[in-house]
Image (tube, grey):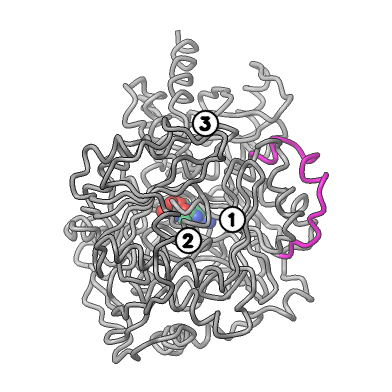
Amino acid sequence: MEEIDALLTESRTFPPPPAFAAAAHGNTRDPWSRADADYEAYWAEQARALEWITPWKQVLDWKPPHAQWFLGGQLNVAANCVDRHVRGPARNKAAIIWEGEPGDRRTLTYWDLFVEVRKFANVLTSLGVHKGDRVGIYLPLIPECAIAMLACARVGAIHSVVFGGFSPESLRDRMNDAEAKVLITADGGYRRGQIVPLKRNADKALAESPTVTHCVVVRRLAAGVVDDTFSQMQEGRDHWWHRLMEGAPAGHEPQPMDAEDPLFILYTSGTTGKPKGIVHTTGGYLTGVASSTKLVFDLKDDDVFWCTADVGWITGHSYLVYGPLANGATAVMYEGAPDWPEKDRFWSLCEKHGVTILYTAPTAIRAFMKWGDAHPKKHDLSRLRLLGSVGEPINPEAWMWYHEVIGGGRCPIVDTWWQTETGSIMIAPLPGATVTKPGSATQALPGYAVTLLDSAAKEIGIGGGLLAVTKPWPSMLRTLWRDDARYVSTYFSKWDGRPDLYFPGDGAKRDADNYLWILGRVDDVLNVSGHRIGTMEVESALVEHPAVAEAAVVGRAHELKGQALCAFVTVREGQLTSLALRDELREFVARKIGALARPDDILFSADLPKTRSGKIMRRLLRDIAEGRALGDTTTLADPSVVAGLKAQYEAQES
Ligand code: 7RM
């Protein structure tokens, strides 16, 4: 039996526009040929684009499931992202164009970054931070995020960024697990016009984080709102960022780091609750992100690259900070919400800053669709030349809308599949070389060995299966912080006796052109009368209906079929819900992908429970559909959504 059935077919294809292809970095199959011919030589070539203090002696040491890359090599990430650009023509180029939610703006050139990062590196040293120490970063999305991360990298400290939307408890647990010495935070940040009281949260966390001896506080809040309730400074422990910077020396030599020294820890919430501290190292990580940023986004000197993710997520680490800066590019950074003060904020930002490459998530794209075309139509988006998607499968409907309404039909879309664990993009088109298909992340990038396996590790040709990575790659996680056993059991124990096979936890299908279509997390797969149905295809079919903005599908136990399908549906703005619409949607899915995928239940809801990075939390919807008490809801963006849904579901049942 197949691990997962493939139901949907999507036959539209989009070749790279000729002019785009002609100017693109990758516009032939050549990178794949080179990588296939000599895998290690390919990665060595990518790594040589970085500046090394000491050359490596060995490209790869692979003792499954532990890999080491560029052994003997030494480099410094901050020197690669800042110093080397300052020596060249990018000295006065904008590195970060930042806009705060209230509309305040700052632009930092590479020279500005050089000045700030060196000074803050000296600040860290003065607070007793040494190579290998852990530093927590809990900030709104302001330039100090990048400065703090790069300053850590400069002195060899391991940063652990905690998303500013997380609670004091989450912050505390992460600080304690990593035994952080210093925490960098701000008095507050702005989100939907409200103040996020970061320092107050930090105070609560630090009351139970005994290893943290110093807390550096950025003054973010406007003068009028700065008051003691947002920033009560604790004598001896707390220091204003700007005060420390005033007294810091300007010069600083970057600490030479071994390629395999850790660069950062980033916690991801696992299925069991206790977050996993994903550990990334220096040489391999930077090689992976620098190389993929250039190739996948076809990054050129005059591009204005906007990755809309927060630095609290891996996407922000890799494609807001390290990837663009390693390439000497200009990155846009925006602090706030996409619908503040109006639902056109993203398009206003694109127009105002002349964004050429936009990288965002399907959940955002579906929200924009729901809000209607008028918002983007108000703005000149003609500078855009490339669009990217990440975080979830992008359903063809959203892909087409992104292509037409945002991209004006002229911009290729790169649907990029990867994970916190993989560090950088693994499956994606090269926009100048790959014919794209709406909903498919296409194929593995050059230098990545991705395939589909069944549960006996047998390769699947055409059809559905388990995604697997068969060779190590430079930016792979190296371990879980102080829990290597969990690293082995989570990622390298899916197939008996094969510790060389990495299991990402996703299901996918391969089509006749050897394209991959990610079908969602394997944990979410439904089993209806023996058919293994991925959530993505049913959701995608639902979203194709003009009344539907977003859908999430889960299974509940059913005595005859094994599982029955339960769909949670959000309708488009202005659309009314009715029993007739419910029946219509059930038939619509049956027609699109077959009667076996016809949802048994459809529940209309104004919102779906999502993580703070925008991924739908199907686990909680399953709890609702099966009438269980709700599991852990602490990682939800808005916990009230799921409580409301549960009440609504129960009312409908009775
Ligand atoms: C970058 C990021 C990882 C999980 C991954 C998938 C899903 C991410 C795509 C995708 C389909 C994509 N890191 N995912 N990108 N699914 N198409 N292009 O999101 O660690 O937070 O999540 O996200 O399930 O395993 S993550």
Q: Is residue 596 above or below residue 107?
A: above
- Secondary structure beneath dot 2 equals helix
Dot 3 amino acid type: Leu
Q: Earlier in the sequence, mark 3 or mark 2?
A: 2
Residue 187 at what x, y percent from top left?
44, 41
Report the Cα–Cα distance between label 2 and label 1: 10 Å
Q: Residue at x 18, y 58 (%)?
A: 482
> Pointers 1 and 3 in contact (CB under 8 A)?
no
The residue nearer to you, when weighing 152 against 475, is: 152
Q: Which residue is under mark 2?
A: 146
Label 1 sits on what residue type?
Answer: Met
Residue type at numbered disc 2: Ala
Mark 1 sits on what residue?
333
Sequence-earlier tag: 1 or 3: 1
Is 374 contained in the magenta span?
A: yes
Q: Disc 3 marks which residue?
A: 608
Residue 464's label in the rendered image is none
Q: Residue furthest front?
A: 247
Q: Are marks 2 and 1 in contact (CB under 8 Å)?
A: yes
* Segment colored magenta: 367-385
**Could you say where residue 74 lies in the image, as x and y percent from the top left?**
32, 84
Is residue 1 visible in this depiction of the protein? Answer: no
From the top left corner, tell me how far across and down residue 87 is, in percent.
55, 85
Helix or strand or loop: what does disc 3 sit on? loop
Q: CA distance from mark 1 to mark 3?
A: 27 Å
- The quarter of the displayed image where residue 623 is located: top left
- Is 436 placed above or below 486 here? below
* Image location of residue 49, percent across then percent down: 49, 85
| Residue drawn where x is 58% and y is 39% of the image | 594
How far separated are the C-alphas under marks 3 and 2?
A: 32 Å
Count of numbered labels shown in the rendering: 3
